[in-house]
Image (spheres, rainbow, N blue to C red):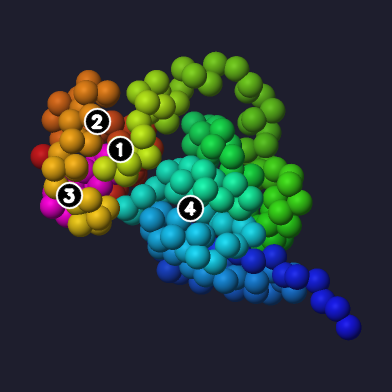
Amino acid sequence: MSFEKKITVLIADDHMIVREGIRKLLEAESDIEVIGEADTGRKTVALTHELHPDVVIMDIAMPHMNGVEATRQILRTNPEVKILILSAHSDDAYVERVMELGAAGYLIKQVSAYFLAEAVREVLKGNTFYSPSIARRLQKREQNLMSRKGFLKEGAFNLTSREVEVLQLVAEGEANKQIASKLEISIKTVEKHREHLMHKLDIHETAGLTRYAIEAGIIESSVQLTIV
């Protein structure tokens, strides 16, 4: 007797209660198997490389590396993986940015269990899948995207993946030594990345970098506790 291979899923969200809820919802589906969980963007990238899930359910706002940058890094090296965004944020700038990077779908966290399971199945087939409210908005707007704030700002496109990582950690209040340790690079390299960030963005103080990271959606305003 033969059995169809289950759809393997990795859940990425920094809230344990959310991950547990998603796991329970998906484990009720006979054709879906949750094979891992991650609470930061960096862990999500590492576990994707290690576990090779069919679908990654990705939150946007996560510490150390946000879901947008994690999506970019995963799809750069594992283009076969389907990224399904599940976020409380539904701003058009977020939606457009992750879809440009290659995400297969975007759901807001108010969706039902039925929609989540269907989205997993549909993106694995190669289809895109949106929450109904997002789908309606996307149908109404196809132009003038480049005038949006946030990730669609011109400066954000000029940053490398490493510079985005450094910017997020700077905005989260990490010192150069801590950034160097987390990224496993030298302090001098961190300093060089900060110099490049300031030059590219024409921002020359930490508070300005932090404000830019918040405006660009790299971190949430609630994440940054201390602005110096």
Three-letter amino acid code of the residue under disc 2: Leu
Of the two numbered discs 3 and 1 in the rendering, the one whose residue sits closer to the viewer: 3
Q: Residues within 10 Å of mark 3 (few under 14, many from 20)?
A: some
Quickly name the residue at label 3: 186
State whether residue 136 appears in this view: yes
Sequence-wise, which precedes: disc 4 or disc 1? Answer: 4
Residue 58 x %, y %: 52, 53
- Residue occupying the point 39% across, 21% down: 154
Q: Write the residue at 60% across / 70% down.
A: 34
Q: Is residue 68 left or right of residue 196?
A: right
The disc labelled 3 sits on which kind of residue?
A: Ser
Q: Label 2, on which residue? A: 197
Which is closer to the viewer, label 4 or label 2?
2
Residue at label 1? 163
Residue at left 64%, top 39%? 133
Instruction: From this view, report whether residue 132 is shown above or below residue 198.
Output: below
Q: Amino acid at mark 4?
A: Asp
- Specify whether residue 171 is painted magenta: yes
Nearest to the eye among marks 2 and 3: give it. Answer: 3
Asked whether the beta carbons under mark 2 and mark 1 sit within 8 Å of each other, the answer is yes
Question: Crowdedness of circle 1 by 10 Å Cα count: few (<14), some, many (20+)?
Answer: some
Badge 2 vs badge 3, beta-carbon distance below 8 Å: no
Q: Residue 81 placed where, x, y %?
A: 61, 53
